[in-house]
Image (spheres, rainbow, N blue to C red):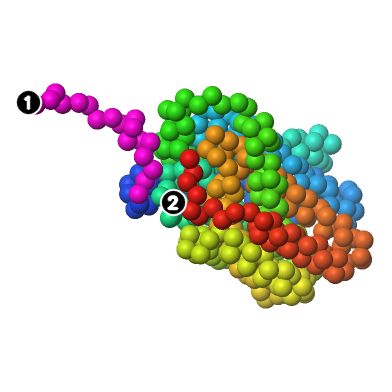
Amino acid sequence: MSSAPTAPDTGAAATVTKTSLNTKDMRRILASSFIGSAIEYYDFVLYATAASLVFNKVFFANLGPGFDLFASFVTLAVGYIARPVGGLIFGHFGDRLGRKQMLVLSMLIMGLGTTAIGLLPTTAQIGMAAPVALVILRLVQGVAVGGEWGGAALMAIEHAPKKHRGFAAAFANAGGPAGAILGTLALSLFAAISGKDFLVWGWRVPFLLSALLIVVGMVIRLKVAETPAFQRLEAAGEKRRVPLLDVLKNNPRAVVLGLLATTSFYVCQSMTTVWGVSVAVESGADKNGVLNIKAVAALLTLVICFYSARLSDRIGRRRVLIGASVLGAVLVYPILMLMSNGELWGFAAAIILGNGLVQGFLYGPIAAYVAEQFPTRNRYTGASLAYQGASMIGAGFTPMIVAGLSLATGGGIWLIAVFWIAAMLASAIAVKATPEGTKRDLD
């Protein structure tokens, strides 16, 4: 007896987690996570670099030396304050409606905000409306990138096989340094092209180029399927409450420890690539040289990120993260001394050690580490809350805090070193207190 042929169950097939990273679908997923994150972080990091070199002169020029840079870093902090808000908003709908839709929306919002910054008149042209508008647009950037990371990381993790989750998640994280490279080189290129007119129009062009990059990213993301983990959750028909309330009731410890664990990475990033850039230039190092060296260090971060992520798949996330935090604490004082010596070689050595080596080892495993602490039903919300909360504290406030510590000590670095070491050790302790996630079933 023969049976009638049946149509393939494409819906069921779609819910099966990939068994290898080397398939056409998986390559597309990883490329989407990497390129999408790179474009979003191009926009976000571009602002951070411009805050160090441009905005204090264009939007806060009348405040006086030291205070103009402090005000510029305040606007930088606003974006980081908005990131947890973005993580909660996009996390809520990402846990209720799916990961893919939120990724597309976050990219569109980021592109519009960044392009608008490139068109913004200066304080000399429209008065106080300029810095106010700058703060609002930075808020828009913060909300967008707050939703980006969770979606990009989960898109990779929830598609990938268990033994490769750390490496797959690194593609979303690696978009950060890749975007930093693009943003830094774009700013450096137009600083060279525009010369003395850099503060007039040269700095604007990299912001306006964001519009073209967003189109590319949108095309790629629209072709990616929803994650198998979320589809299985949908098929189970489980009644889901508000994801934020679910996280706060059932996973508050994971949020707090994940936030503390991630803070070291963000403090390291801010100290080297934001505050460090301004200190090096103010100490006498060539501006274009500093930007080019920063881009090279970001390339090293990219390489170390993938290496440490793969290493974490073999020996565990906790070992890699704790080792990197301890290494960072040991290298803090040498990095600060080199960064402020006024020489390009000093800045190069400092940023290679801090941004390339320490940050790279912290960055690789962190996406998988945080995501593995939460169940599928609230993973987007929980992981975003922990990760973006750390970005607000570690990256948003660090340049402002360090600038204030420098003013308080008359340019001394010992208090800054204490602050940095404390952040590293706090993260190591938090990681030690969490369970290893490499063997966990995501469902």
Amino acid type of the residue that numbered disc 1 sits on in the rendered structure: Met
Total numbered labels: 2
Question: Label for residue 295?
Answer: none
Q: Do residues under tags 2 and 1 come within 8 Å of each other at their CB atoms?
A: no
**Viewed as shown, does residue 162 lie left or right of 255?**
left
Magenta segment's dominant SS is: loop
Which callout, 2 or 1, points at the residue further toward the start of the chain?
A: 1
Q: In which quarter of the image is residue 425?
A: bottom right
Which quadrant of the view contains residue 291? bottom right
Residue at image point 80% right, 67% down:
417
- 342 or 258: nearer the viewer: 258
In front of the other: label 2 or label 1? Answer: 1
Magenta stretch? 2-19
Q: Mark 1 Cα within 10 Å, few/some/many (few <14, many 20+)?
A: few
Q: Disc 2 marks which amino acid?
A: Lys
Magenta span has 196?
A: no
* 357 relative to 162, above or below: below
Residue at horizontal 86%, vertical 65%?
A: 415
Residue receiving disc 1: 1
Question: Whole-percent x and y of residue 419?
Answer: 81, 62
Residue lying at 58% horizontally and 36% vertically, measured from the top left: 378
The image shows residue 53 at horizontal and vertical percentages of 74, 56
Residue 171 seen in this snapshot: no
Under circle 1, the secondary element is loop
> Does the stretch in magenta take in 4?
yes
Instruction: Locate residue 336 relative to residue 109 in the image: left or right.
Output: right
Mark-to-mark CA distance, 2 and 1 = 41 Å
Q: Mark 2 = which residue?
A: 162
* Rendered location of residue 17, percent (x, y): 39, 43
Viewer-side residue, 126 vs 217: 217
Q: What element carries label 2?
A: helix
Quadrant in the rendering for residue 80: top right
